[in-house]
Amino acid sequence: MNIKGVYLVSGYLSVLVGVLAAACIFRINWMYYGVALSFVGMILSIINIFLNTKYYFDQEKFPKGYLGLFLSSLPVIFMMLIIFKFKK
């Protein structure tokens, strides 16, 4: 697979995994899966942003990795809010 293909696949997968991770916030039983998916989504997003910076930075203003990174960070931020709110 060439670099452009890895760039495209990592972009779409980072958004998809980010949406799945963000959807896991709504059930507390699914938070373990949400945090695990967020780590995978963050790795895919970082790969996408890195490849955009290194090879394709003139073709696309806003790579999909930024949206994937935002969506993937939501379960981690939510978990931190829950921990700090109920800490005594």
Image (cartoon, rainbow, N blue to C red):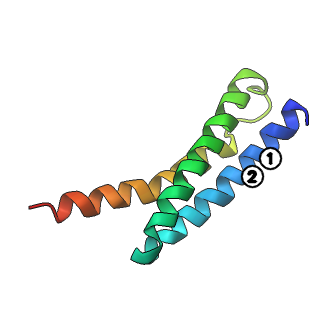
Name the kind of residue labelled 1 in the image.
Val
Please state if 16 lies on the left or on the right of 23 as rendered.
Answer: right
- On residue 66, which mark appears? none
Where residue 81 appears, as percent x and y from the top left, is 28, 59
| Residue situated furthest left in the rendering | 88
Q: Is residue 81 above or below residue 55?
A: below
What residue appears at the point 66 percent right and 55 percent down from the top-left corner? Answer: 15
- On residue 12, which mark appears? 2
Position of the C terminus by quadrant: bottom left
Where residue 39 appears, as percent x and y from the top left, is 53, 49
Q: Is residue 60 above or below residue 64?
A: above
Q: Secondary structure at mark 2?
A: helix
Label 1 to label 2: alpha-carbon separation:
5 Å
Q: Is residue 49 above or below residue 31?
A: above
| Residue situated furthest top in the rendering | 54
What residue appears at the point 67 percent right and 35 percent down from the top-left corner? Answer: 47
Where residue 19 appears, as percent x and y from the top left, is 60, 63
Dot 2, crowdedness within 10 Å: few (<14), some or many (≥20)? Answer: some
Q: Secondary structure at mark 1?
A: helix
Residue that numbered label 1 is attached to: 9
Dot 1, crowdedness within 10 Å: few (<14), some or many (≥20)? Answer: few
Where residue 84 appears, as percent x and y from the top left, is 20, 57
What residue appears at the point 19 percent right and 62 percent down from the top-left corner? Answer: 85
The image shows a total of numbered marks equal to 2
Q: Quadrant of residue 44?
A: top right
Q: Is residue 36 above or below residue 9?
A: below
Q: Are marks 1 and 2 in contact (CB under 8 Å)?
A: yes
Name the kind of residue labelled 2 in the image.
Tyr
Position of the N terminus by quadrant: top right
